[in-house]
Amino acid sequence: INRIQYDLAAQLEGKALVQANEILEGYLQYRNNMAVIKNQFVNEYGDQTYNLDVVKQMKVALRASRYGFWPEDAIVGFSEQEGQYDDYMMARVNVTSDSHLSALEKQTLIDQLDQQSPQWIIEASQRANLVSNVRATEKSLRSSGASNEDIYEMREQAYGAEGAERLRVLDDQRTQWKQLVELYRVDLNSMIASSGGYANIDETLLNSLRSQYFEGPELVRIKAIDKLELEL
């Protein structure tokens, strides 16, 4: 946030700077309020939170809440495309989830929807579908015993050589992280056993152990994992 404010101050001045900071503050408050609204729906509807009709209600509530934090011109400027994409996706889900339609009827309606929608929405949807399809294919390949080379080739066909290489690097990083956590957990389990349980672990010793394995953002990450998985 400080970086954004610094950049605004470097590019704007006077009334324009004041307005920009007000919009930024409104955005931050809106994002916080989004979490409040979503929690309200979860508390009210529980397992039905992801029911299509409930999702629609939540989208309406989220859109209406913008007017409490932004002026109308800012809402149009910052949220118009988001609203258009939401409308497109909801219309698409309405079609695909309609059990009364045949596969051919669904495809016809989706084609009509695509023809009526801006090109940028179609491209965004295609990218999202591509990622989803690649992940599903990768999961299937791995479950059938495919090699890393097979996975790389599949990704290269979908994303090109550069994209496949970036994903390979991410795979290596995830593997290294997993191995590091496993080594750390061996020492952690020994500490837990010698302390007589989780509740008796010395916080200073625990932090020292973490620092032997992790640094910087890794420390924040492992603390969050320990809290979630071990309630440490």
Image: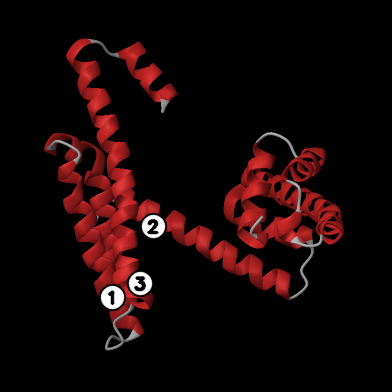
Q: Which mark is residue 125?
A: 2
Q: Residue at x 27, y 60 (%)?
A: 88
Q: Residue at x 71, y 58 (%)?
A: 199
- Residue under label 3: 50
Q: Secondary structure at mark 2?
A: helix
In terms of sequence position, does the residue under pointer 2 or pointer 1 come before the other?
Answer: 1
Instruction: State which quarter of the image contains the C terminus.
Output: bottom right
The correct choice, above or below, for 4 with respect to 149 in the image is above
Position in image of residue 189 (x %, y %): 82, 59
Q: Nearer the viewer, residue 12 or 139?
A: 12
Regarding residue 53, the answer to whether it shows in the image is yes
- The quadrant in which the N terminus is found is top left
The percent position of residue 94, horizontal first and vertical second, equals: 27, 74
First in sequence, mark 3 or 1: give its number. Answer: 3
Q: Residue at x 65, y 37 (%)?
A: 217
The answer to whether residue 97 is above or below residue 4 is: below
Residue 183 place in picture, x, y as percent: 85, 53
